[in-house]
Image: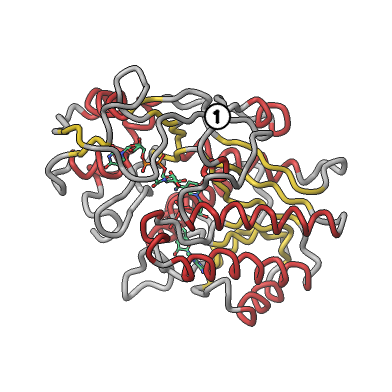
C-alpha cells in the first residue's frame, strides 16, 4: 500500500487547493484520502464525490479516496486509518463563520474542539503522530505590535468563539506534544486566504451571502450582489479602510506541502506555529482598485460604519516560514484578483453550474 496523507475537510476551499497542489507535483508519492462531512462543500445528487474533488481528479488524472464522514465519528475515522497507510494528516475540517460562532458557540466548540480531539485520539491509536493544522492569525487577537510574529502573545482579546476554537486547539496540541516526544505538529497561522486555482476550475464557493471581502467583491462583479459595503472609513490607515495581509490560496497550498516536507527532518519534533502571509498589508479600497484593474469590472461600493470585532490593521512577519520551510509567497495582489475573477466569471454560481 502506498503511503497516504489524510486530508480532513479536503473538499473545502483551502483543502481542495492543497489536494490539487499535492497531486500536481511530479514528485508526489502519496495517495490522498479525504474525509469531509459536506457541511460546507457541494456534491451533486448523482455523484459519489464532491464537485471540487471530482474536478481535481479530472485535472490531475489521479484518484482521490473520499469518505463522507464527520471527524467526530470515531468509528468511521478508525475504519479510514485501517484502510490506508496514513503517514500524516492535514487537518482543515472546521466550522469557520465568525458571526455564526457568536450565535452558536456550543456548535463551534463541539465541531472544532471535539472534532480535533477525536482526530488526535484516533491518530494516536494508529501510531500516526504528524499533523499540519489550519490555524489563523485570529489567535493573536488585537495586535500589540506589527508585523505579527509567532512570538506575539496568543489567546488575548480574541473577538469570537471561532477564533477561540483555533487558540484552544493550538493549546491542546502543545500539551500533547509536551506529553509525548513522538508528536510533530505544525500549526499554520493563515492570514487572509483569497484567490483560486489558476485553471479557474476550483475556487471559493461560500453558501449564502459571503462574509469575507474577496468573495463579496467577486459576487458584486458578476452581478449576484449590487454593491460592496466598505466597513469603516475612519481607521488609522492611509485611506481609512481596514488593512489585511491577503495571501493567494495557491501560495498557502504550497506552504502545506513544505510543512509535510519538514516532517522528514529528524531534528524537527514538537509543536511549531508558523505564519503564512505575504508580509504586506492592503486596504479594502486598494483591494477594490486591484480587482477592478484585474477584471475590468466596476465594483460599486459605499463606505459605512465599522463592523463589530474588526481590527484596523494586521500583517505577518513571515521570516520564520522562510527559515523553517524555505517558503515565501510569490503571487501578487493582482494575481489574487485575476484568479478570483477567472473562477467567479467561469463559475458564476460556484460549483452548482
Ligand atoms: P471550508 O469551510 O471551505 O472547508 C472546511 C471543510 O471542512 C468543508 O468542506 C466542510 O464541509 C468540512 N467540515 C466542516 N466540519 C467538518 C466535520 N466536523 N467533519 C468533517 N468535515 C467537516 O473552509 P476553508 O476556508 O477551506 O478553511 C479550512 C480551514 O482553514 C478551517 O479550519 C478554517 O478555520 C481555517 N482557516 C481558514 C481561513 C479562511 O479565510 N479561509 C483563515 C484562517 C484559517
Ligand atoms: C475574517 C475573520 C477572521 C478569519 C478571517 C479569515 C471576522 C471579524 N474575522 O477576518 O477571524 O480568520 O476572516 O480570512 O470576520 N470588509 C468590508 N466589507 C465586506 C467584508 C469585509 O469592508 O463586505 C472588510 C473588513 O472590514 C476587513 C477586510 O474587509 O477590513 C477583510 O475582511 P474579511 O475578508 O472578512 O477578513 P477579516 O475580517 O480580516
**Tag 1's secondary structure?**
loop
Q: Number of marks in the image?
A: 1
Where on the image, by quarter, is ligand 2? top left
What residue is shown at x 34% (from left), y 27% (from top)?
Answer: 235
Q: Which residue is mark 1?
A: 316
Q: Where is residue 233? Give x, y as percent.
A: 26, 28
Foreground residue among 261 and 56: 261
Quarter of the picture containing the N terminus is bottom right
Question: Is 297 on the left-hand or right-hand side of 252?
Answer: left
Q: Where is residue 11? Give x, y as percent.
A: 46, 60
Indicate yes or no: mark 1 CB to ligand 1 under 8 Å.
Answer: no
Question: Is 163 on the left-hand or right-hand side of 284?
Answer: right
The answer to whether residue 45 is above or below residue 351 is below
Q: How has the structure been colored for display?
A: secondary structure
Quarter of the picture containing the C terminus is bottom left
Q: Where is residue 197? Give x, y as percent.
A: 41, 41
What residue is shown at x 69% (from left), y 34% (from top)?
Answer: 151
Question: Is 284 on the left-hand or right-hand side of 197?
Answer: left
The answer to whether residue 235 is above or below residue 68 is above
Question: Is 182 on the left-hand or right-hand side of 95?
Answer: right
The answer to whether residue 198 is above or below residue 233 is below
What residue is shown at x 37% (from left), y 47% (from top)?
Answer: 203
Instruction: Specify the quadrant of the image occupied by residue 71.
Output: bottom right
What residue is shown at x 77% (from left), y 46% (from top)?
Answer: 263
Foreground residue among 277 and 244: 244
Q: Where is residue 249? Give x, y as percent.
A: 46, 40
Q: Residue furthest top?
A: 238
Neighbor class of circle 1 (other Cα within 10 Å; few <14, some 14-19, many 20+) is many
Amino acid at each position: 500500500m502506498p503511503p497516504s496523507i489524510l486530508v480532513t475537510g479536503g473538499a473545502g476551499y483551502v483543502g481542495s487547493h492543497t489536494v490539487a497542489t499535492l497531486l500536481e507535483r511530479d514528485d508526489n508519492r502519496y495517495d490522498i484520502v479525504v474525509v469531509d462531512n459536506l457541511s460546507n462543500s457541494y456534491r451533486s445528487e448523482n455523484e459519489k464525490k464532491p464537485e471540487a474533488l471530482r474536478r481535481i481528479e479530472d485535472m490531475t488524472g489521479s484518484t482521490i479516496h473520499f469518505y463522507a464522514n464527520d471527524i467526530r465519528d470515531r468509528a468511521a475515522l478508525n475504519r479510514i486509518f485501517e484502510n490506508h497507510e496514513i503517514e500524516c494528516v492535514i487537518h482543515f475540517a472546521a466550522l469557520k463563520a465568525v458571526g455564526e460562532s457568536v450565535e452558536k458557540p456550543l456548535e463551534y466548540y463541539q465541531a472544532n474542539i471535539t472534532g480535533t480531539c477525536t482526530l488526535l485520539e484516533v491518530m494516536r491509536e494508529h501510531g500516526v503522530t504528524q499533523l499540519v493544522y489550519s490555524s489563523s492569525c485570529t489567535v493573536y487577537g488585537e495586535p500589540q505590535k506589527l508585523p505579527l510574529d509567532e512570538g506575539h502573545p496568543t489567546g488575548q482579546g480574541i473577538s469570537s468563539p471561532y477564533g477561540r476554537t483555533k487558540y484552544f486547539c493550538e493549546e491542546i496540541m502543545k500539551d500533547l506534544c509536551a506529553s509525548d516526544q513522538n508528536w510533530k505538529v505544525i500549526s499554520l497561522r493563515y492570514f487572509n486566504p483569497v484567490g483560486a486555482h489558476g485553471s479557474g476550475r476550483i475556487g471559493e464557493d461560500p453558501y449564502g451571502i459571503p462574509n469575507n471581502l474577496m468573495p463579496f467583491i467577486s459576487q458584486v462583479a458578476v452581478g449576484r450582489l449590487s454593491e460592496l459595503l466598505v466597513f469603516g472609513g475612519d481607521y488609522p490607515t492611509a485611506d481609512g479602510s481596514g488593512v489585511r495581509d491577503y495571501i493567494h490560496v495557491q501560495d498557502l497550498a504550497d506552504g502545506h506541502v513544505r510543512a509535510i516536507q519538514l516532517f522528514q527532518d529528524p531534528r524537527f519534533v514538537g509543536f511549531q506555529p508558523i505564519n503564512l502571509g505575504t508580509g504586506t498589508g492592503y486596504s479594502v479600497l486598494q483591494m477594490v482598485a486591484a480587482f477592478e484593474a484585474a477584471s475590468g469590472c466596476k465594483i460599486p461600493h459605499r463606505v459605512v460604519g465599522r463592523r463589530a470585532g474588526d481590527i484596523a490593521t494586521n500583517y505577518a512577519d513571515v521570516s520564520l516560514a522562510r527559515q523553517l520551510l524555505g517558503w515565501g509567497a510569490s503571487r501578487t495582489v493582482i494575481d489574487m484578483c485575476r484568479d478570483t475573477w477567472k473562477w467567479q466569471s467561469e463559475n458564476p454560481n460556484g460549483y452548482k453550474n
